[in-house]
Image (cartoon, coloured by chain):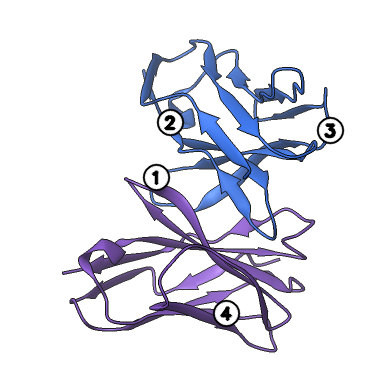
Chain colours: A purple, B blue
Amino acid sequence: KAGVTQTPRYLIKTRGQQVTLSCSPISGHRSVSWYQQTPGQGLQFLFEYFSETQRNKGNFPGRFSGRQFSNSRSEMNVSTLELGDSALYLCASSLDAAKNIQYFGAGTRLSVL
Amino acid sequence: GDSVTQMEGPVTLSEEAFLTINCTYTATGYPSLFWYVQYPGEGLQLLLKATKADDKGSNKGFEATYRKETTSFHLEKGSVQVSDSAVYFCALPGAQKLVFGQGTRLTINP
């Protein structure tokens, strides 16, 4: 069974631009969660989607948004990029994040110049 | 709110040394507890878990025991290898999310 796939693996953007990251969960998983990993703040929860509905959201500004499609694939978008948005963005899939183990992708490394 | 505290890193050991990485938690009730590992350039992998008090999780020579009296879930390995070099995260489940400790970077020298 294929694991969680995140694309692209690396991105370089400039301040003010926007970016879209993609996550394909493990087949059969309906929950997708997103996390931001930085050296200073560690792993921080962004949001979680289950069957196309956002069930939980972390403490991030409105520039960070996401969505989930009917096939459970998810995208997250960051608008008006800031230097501080440089991070590794990790996606995790689960049968249900409320009850089951989460499996992580390799992440997308975003650098904002 | 729920929180996880890990020992400060980084930790550097010689091959075959004994490893302990401390983890304590604050939570309502008795949640499951996890250790995740992140190898260089990769995402997180579940290393082991425990679902109730006094459970011992184990995998790849690593062990951790869920101690409700001390609200701890310390990670141990009797003899580390160079291939164990990675970042280790203790975590517990919150509302549709994982709450992580700050991570401990482990380097094993040959």
Quadrant of the image containing the C terminus of chain A: bottom left
Q: Is residue A37 in sight in this rendering?
A: yes
Callout 4 amino acid = Ser
Q: Which residue is mark 3?
A: B52
Quarter of the image for residue A50 reads: bottom right
Give me the chain letter of mark 3: B
Quadrant of the image containing the N terminus of chain A: bottom right
Task: Respond whether the residues carrying marks 4 and 3 are from the same subunit.
Answer: no
First of labels 2, 1 by sequence position:
1
The vertical placement of B29 against B68, above or below, is below
Q: Could you say where residue A59 lies in the image, as x and y percent from the top left?
A: 48, 62
Q: Which residue is mark 1?
A: B40
Q: Which residue is mark 2?
A: B85
Is there a contact, CB below 8 Å, between mark 2 and mark 4?
Answer: no
Residue at 53% x, 31% y is B5
The mark closer to the camera, 1 or 3, is: 3
First of labels 2, 3 by sequence position:
3
The vertical placement of B97 against B69, above or below, is below
Callout 2 amino acid = Ser
Task: Respond whether the residues carrying marks 4 and 1 are from the same subunit.
Answer: no
* Marker disc for residue A45: none
B8 sits to left or right of B1: left
Residue at 46% x, 31% y is B83
A108 sits to left or right of B60: left
